[in-house]
Image (spheres, coloured by chain):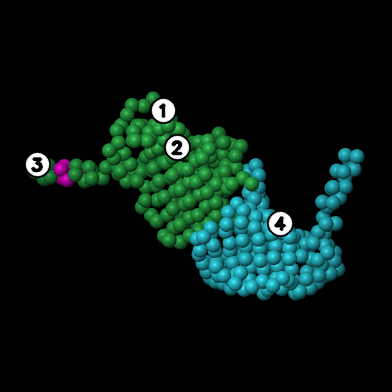
Chain colours: A green, B cyan
Amino acid sequence: MIRFLAISFLAIVTLASCSLKTTEGLRQVHFNKEAVGNPYFSNPEIDYVYKAKIEVYKKNFGGILIIKKTGPESHRVVFTTEFGSKLFDFQFEGDTFTKHFIVDDLDKKFIVNILKDDFRLLVNEKAQVLAVYESENHRIYKTTSGDRFNFYFLEDETEQLQKIVNTTKTKEKVEIDFTSHEGNIADFISIKHKNIKLSINLEKFKNE
Amino acid sequence: MLFFIAFSSSIQAQETAMSASEIVAFKGKVIASAKTTKTIKTDFVQYKHLDFLADDVKTSGKMVFKAPNLVKWEYTNPYQYSVIFKEDQLLINDGGTKSKVDIGNSKLFKKLNQLIVNSVKGNMFNDADFTVSFFKSPKYNKAVFIPKDKKIAGYIASFELLFNKDDAQVFEVKMVEPSQDFTRIVFSNRTLNSTINDSVFSN
């Protein structure tokens, strides 16, 4: 019995100390919104083209990231070098992931999985809301995907999506920050990993 | 009248294969021109064509070449990015972030870089790794390179160079991927054999 208590107590302590940072100190509120969305890659008329800078374990790579909405639930995501050679070409259609092309050097399961998860999170347009929290300037919508959670941070006044945080039950894994100056176009996007030294910075091509 | 315009433009676009003697003459002209070309300075516009896009992705900048094998590609629009090909290294400056890539031990990468360097000069007809065919049109001469190596063929279906008829200089490079998406680079405002300091090729 004492052993059981001790284990329970220990479990409670460990669980408590592992509570998720994302919603720490935030007030949960009632909500009437069923779905939360990401508008930044939702217009099929637009070619979304970004200069990309990737830093992985202190090594730098550059390239061009091209995203296009190609169907009601479908996005094409292509990464090329500055010279135009494709490094990978992915398609997300609902839950289906298609690898159209990837260079040999990147074609490793763990790399493909990271890229797949990051870009799925980036282009995913809608998710069902599980809970809503309030901070000083944001309304935060909790959604689920697989065994992970995504928290969408919408600015109070503008209702603009500013941040998505991907977490497990206890830990933040990936954070995407959006900077937008007009409407539904993200001028800057930063994707940061919390458990590996990987960050991707994107800057939208300016129209001439 | 419309018919006439359509007809004449189809004539212009028409390409025919060069005869054996035309090939010999053409190669000779390109090699002679490459030999006297010590430096090249040129502007370029790059178009990346992906089938699913509404418009090609357009970037532009300047290219500098100094014989025998120094090349600098500098993109200035819409971003700043430069690559210097120097011996077995790439010196990259990505909007202020500088890095170095060793290509000495990557055969594929070396080949791709060699292609870029040689295509600037146009003189790559002796490359044993490609099957080359030659075409002519009223406006240009064209050489099409198809890789023999399976690994390279996985990245490049063909590589095309378009040459001016008069001075045998390359004015367009096109790299077609197995998916048929392609990259097209068009040169303009070319200056030949001006003095270019070696310091241009350091990061």
Please give left or right for residue A207 compared with residue A135 in the image.
Answer: right
From the viewer's perspective, is the residue at label 1 or at label 3 nearer?
1
For disc 3, the marked residue is A1
Q: Is residue A49 above or below residue B148?
A: above
Mark 4, chain letter? Answer: B
- Element assignment for label 1: loop
Q: Amino acid at mark 4?
A: Val
Q: Amino acid at mark 3?
A: Met
- Give the crowd class for mark 1: few <14, some 14-19, many >=20 residues within 10 Å: few
**Residue B17 in sight:** no
Is tag 1's residue or tag 2's residue first in the polypeptide sequence? 1
The quadrant in which the N terminus of chain A is found is: top left
Which residue occupies 48% across, 39% down? A124
Q: Is residue A26 above or below residue B41?
A: above
| Label 1 to label 2: alpha-carbon separation | 16 Å
Is tag 1's residue or tag 3's residue first in the polypeptide sequence? 3
For disc 4, the marked residue is B186
Mark 1, chain letter? Answer: A
What range is drawn magenta here? Answer: A7-11
For disc 2, the marked residue is A161
